[in-house]
Amino acid sequence: MSELSFFLGCIAPNRYPGIEKATKIVMEDLGVHLRELKGASCCPAPGVFRSFDKLTWLALASRNVVLSEEMGVDLLTVCNGCFGSLVDANNVLKEDLELRKEVNKVLAEVGREFKGTIRVRHIMEYLYDDVGVEKVKESIKYPVDLKVAVHYGCHLIKPSKERHLGSIENPTFFDELVEATGAESVMYKDKNACCGAGGGVRTSALETALKLARAKLENAKAAGVDCIVDACPFCHLQMDVGQTEIAKKFGDVFNMPIVHYSQLLGLGMGYTPQELGIDMNYVKNDDFIAKIEKIGGGK
Amino acid sequence: MAELVGAVAIAGGGIAGIQSSLDLADSGLKVYLIESSPSIGGVMAQLDKTFPTLDCSMCTLSPKLAEVARHPNIELLPYSEIKSISGAAGNFDVTVTRKATYVDPDKCTACELCLAKCPSKVLDEYNEGTSKRKAIYLPFPQAVPRVMVIDAEHCIYLTKGKCGNCKKVCENDAIDYEMKDRDEVIKVGSVILSTGFKPYDPTPLEQYHYEHPDVVTSIEFERLLSASGPSEGHVQLADGTTPKKIAWLQCIGSRNPEIGRPNCSAVCCMYATKEAMVAMEHDNELETAIFNIDVRAFGKGFEQFYQRAKNEKEVRFIRSRPSGVDIDPVTNQLSLRYEVEGSTETACEEFDMIVLSIGLTPSDSSKKLAEIAGVEMDEYGNVATAIDAPMTTSVPGIFACGTIVAPKDIPDTVADASGAASKAHSILASERGTLVTERTYPPEKDVTAEEPRIGVVVCDCGINIASVVDVPAVVEYVKTLPHVVHAYEQTYACSTDSLDIIKEKIEEHDLNRVVVASCTPRTHEPLFQDTCRGAGLNPYLFELANIREHCAWVHQKEPEKATEKAKEVIRMSVARVALLDPLYTQKLDFNHAGLVIGGGVTGMTAALDIAEKGFTTYLIEREHELGGLLRTFTRLQDGRTTSEILDPMIAAVKSNPNITVHTGTTLDEVEGAMGSFKGKLSNGEEIEFGSAIIATGANEFVPEGYFGYGSENVITQSTLEVKLEEGTVDAKNVVMIQCAGGRNDERPYCSRVCCTTAVKNAIRLKEDDPERNIYVLYRDIRTYGVWEELYTRARELGVLFMRYTEDDEPIVGNGTVTITDKLLNDTKFEIATDLTVLSAPLVAPDGVEDTATLFKVPIDSNKFFLEAHIKLRPVDFATDGVFLAGCAQAPKLVDESISQASAAASRACTILAKDQLETSGVMAVVDEDVCIGCGRCTEVCAYSAPTLKEVEVVTEEITYVTRKSEINPAICKGCGSCAAECPTGAITSRHFTTKQISAVIDAFAYADGRIEEVA
Amino acid sequence: MEAMEMSDTIKTSDLDKAFKDEVMTEPGAEKLILCFNCTGCTAGCTMAEHEPNYNIRQLLRMANLGMRDELLNHPYLWNCTTCYKCQERCPQGVPNVDILLKIRTMAVHSGIMLDNHRKVAQLMAKTGHAVPINDDNKEKRKKLGMNELPETVHNYPDALEEVHKIVAKTKFDKLTEEQS
């Protein structure tokens, strides 16, 4: 059985616990055993903390990686932001020995040392490369009959030199994994656009950040989808909570359900929306919940 | 020591290979022209119009294709590739694989019956995959050789053993499925590589969405514009509708180190401007926009072309190059977002079609060939050459020209090609004439006393004529015309067996005049004339009546009228041919010396090239030192000092036994014409020469009145170069200002060299002292082609670049230069400066008008000499025997000057290498008794053929001296302008006499073919 | 760029080459000077579509020219969402985002930091999470059958202590504390 440590980050456990739960149950069903990464902290959010101090970012990020190193397993994250933070830190410290020395001086304060022995994985690329689309397809008991707008986000695939996940202008792996569940990935305008949350912008300039989210929601709506599927709790929050903020600031109402891939996969495996925490979104869309309840045969 | 072989193999039949072939063949060397595709022509054959004159590309190219086809010294090896090269300079064995075409070239007449019946459709390479062709095909209508080819990969018979339609319908039994590839070894003395380029495939740049049907490459767009293209010249979107707004994106696949294509491709700014202009000519409601980083309009006439496009035609030039194309997936609408100059903002616009201006990359043949030849390549995948030897590869005896060396446009390619020919010729000068065959003919019949006995062949041209014109009816009609003793129909008059039949008929019916009614004289007249000669008939007793291009092809929908017109056309030709006289060419002895005016690097290169071929050469330089402009500039772009190339060149010139150098001397008088020039030097000496090259160069403009020039610390680039060499630059802050005194109303041209010179010197300044602050203030950075690497290097060293516009120029103050930087939202910068360097343009030197007058050649409004044709004859004048090269033609860099110098030498030697000059039979002659010496003929002749000579007239009563016109048969082109202008009718335009023309007009008027005899 | 009045003329003698050099110490940032102003970055920028005052190319140009004060104090320095689109597409390979982040750290290190950023930095330094758990979400976790607290620093005080030690060692706490 494959084993990985499960890095939670902040937003999944503390704002969208459904994503945490969904991940645990779908991965187990796929034969991947996730072990708790005890004592992990904020990744730390790359756009925010890398804007303040590089050493602090590297030190905190590498501490999270070291926790997994000490467990002797690779690290799995379900968040683009955490992935960006941890994979970039991991790569940079594997290669730049001077920088590694500097960071290890800091880690020595807490009795830890970065050795560069593990890989940082994101659930989407792990499912595609290690589990495989075929196996995911086989795990589907109830085809998810939905039209979805797939949102890759930014830090899953960029910077591409560090990621080796193929085309960044026209990626397909996330769409393939979505279609493996039986859902239809619908093309929409500016599919590759950023949700607006990252880089500390949501924190410091909310209204500006919401303009980007709004464009995303408009385009998805124009394409006639049932929901947006993402692989990043920060994008998830920006597009879910963001809708309530957009309604207040701009007056636009979208009623767009936002679903994390782990939750979409969970539906296909037969779990209920309630079990997966999809009904806990800030945007309440009863029609959507009713629709997806039917997927599992109305358990 | 192996023997020298007087032949040259040329790999690549594009415009470069074609030009080299013609020069060498005209100089008496045998040429093997090897082309991997079925036809010569290359990329130029795919272009619609060429910049900056908007000439039709094929119209200027196809005469050259025809010339190659019928040149007795050129053996064309189409659909062939070089497999290996062994040996050494002077004696190479080249193994050529002749790929099987499955069509016998001796039997095929390209009637295209097979094409109609072929069921296999293939993406057409000529149209860049936008349309389909058949497995048996002609690559394009004007293909040379005009022989069908079967693409074995897609032929149903050759792959599956089924079909075989083409063989069934061919009336000449030309299809041969058993044909095999075969290797042939040719012996040559030199090899020229001219395999051109491959357009960059933009698929990897996914952000430009090349997969969208209305995102096309520039070369696909050429095909759309072209009347022979997939939509017959109607620019249309994939769904067939007409686009209203088209955008061009520049630098796609160029200036991009990230994808391994760091160079500029040199031609794209110009071709995009041209495409926009031509597209707007097709549709005057079309809106166009060209998104660019810099507009590189650096060649002769280019800047003016760009300004015209911008100001008169309203092509929008937007200084922002989007990094991608946006598509709305619901509507499929294309749009572009771009930065608005002078603000922080971006704007978005929708377009119907987007053209990607793709760059020039090394072709696959080039890479393979370079390996086979063992020549060194540079890091860009091009054949490596040096600035002072731009056509010379690392292998002696193997030369390279055109885009295989670096991206460049057609005029530079043509010059390069002639230059490479010069290099090959120099090695093999002693072998001129050894491998070329003179054709022999039977003795000529004397028909002067005979009544006209006219034979008429009316050609079906397969179905091309016969499907519209009722040929049998025409033949019956023709039989009724006066003096016609024999008329018959022929399926293909030009096929080898048909030509034999013509000869038989001439004998059988004792014909003394022949008319062939078929296609265009441009391609076929010489062929039939040759046939007549082969039957003992004077070739000028032949007339070709065009009933294809002028009749069947343009009146396809009106067959009855077309038939009547064919009858009229032939009637007119019959009337003319009856009155034609036998004419004879003359062979004249002439002076084989060459003259070069101008002793700079251009003049010296030309002189050496001519001398190497064994001819006496005079080099005239008005300064006391040789060297020209390179004495003022001190470094080349590759870092070497100019004296490193000048000194050896001067030594070579002075020590060459064939060259006589006159410094401190000018050429003051010239008379005569090609082959018989007589000149008088300022030192009193008289010289005789057969041809002349004008290489009078250029000077750096003294920019008085511009940017504070004249005050201390404001200097020009040449002064900076001298100071750098002397080590006397101690400025810590340097500002360079581009376009100082250029690209304005007084000098509206771009001086081409200044951006490269500026970055070259900026690099020197930085390498000398890395702490220096250097700012280069520019309008466009025109470091074109491989010189983009210098611009990159300058930036790497920390040179800063700021952009200004012509209506808001920098202001030079006391120790400062103030500029509104367009690159930073119009922020004003006051730049501290200890030294301000002005990049002033090159201008024509004093006295060019005098030189122009001496040789009766034109200069343009900027006082640069005006060549015969800006694209295909960059070093020729319309006046025979006189050539130009270097900055005398237009500002250029050293390697370009050297290339042109060799080119001019090659061109001059196509004359000097002949044993005798052969005149045409068609020319004008003067009846001195009637001539009154008014001189009007000398004024209208474009070729300076007539001159007025003093003649002593002796009559019974009086002897007096007067002037009479004398027309030089060596240069007369037989155009008839002088005859038309002559007030007394003293000049007869042979082959186009008044009587002959009147007969044609009468024949048109009188349906019974009556010819009014004029006494 | 509202920070600068267009009528202001900048003297190059006031520009700071050392600033550019410092920016370029960031690995990859030595390519900053290769920028030839093709404008592809700004033209493709998603933020530029929605915020016309934000122009990444011009911000980097200011760095290239050594405009230290204007840049560190620039109001739109904080608008980039680090989506990396520009960095991916740059033909010269200029790492726009990496350079911008470097400049931001230089601003923070010279005391220039937005209030909200300061707050989130302090929150993370204190709780180990930029977005810590709250009562609402403790309830949600319970409802889903999970433990109230996730297995992060929230549940392991020793681990949180490690975070505190680290931010003290890097002086992050000092860096982001309230300015008087």
Image (cartoon, coloured by chain):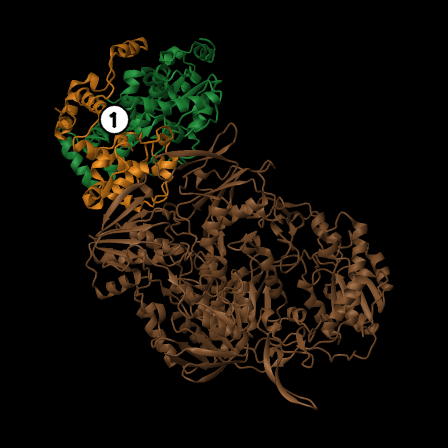
| Residue B90 in view in this figure | no
Q: Residue at x 27, y 29 (%)?
A: A47
Rendered-image quadrant of the C terminus of chain B: bottom right
Q: Residue A165 location in percent, x, y?
A: 38, 35
Q: Residue B453 location in percent, x, y?
A: 83, 72
Check the rendered structure and report the hue given to chain B.
brown
The chain painted orange is C
Q: Residue B523 location in percent, x, y?
A: 66, 63
| Residue B259 in view in this figure | yes
The residue that mark 1 highlights is: A43
Q: Residue B591 location in percent, x, y?
A: 53, 82
Q: Secondary structure at mark 1?
A: loop
Q: Is residue B37 above or below residue B346?
A: below
The chain painted green is A
Q: Is residue B268 above or below residue B28?
A: above
- Point out the residue furthest to the front here: B957
Q: Is residue C132 above or below residue B114?
A: above
Chain under callout 1: A
**Residue flagged by tag 1: what amino acid is it?**
Cys
Rendered-image quadrant of the N terminus of chain B: bottom left
- Left or right of residue B163: residue A24: left
Q: Nearer the viewer, residue A259 or B183?
A: A259
Q: Nearer the viewer, residue B638 or B724?
A: B724
Q: Residue at x 12, y 30 (%)?
A: C169
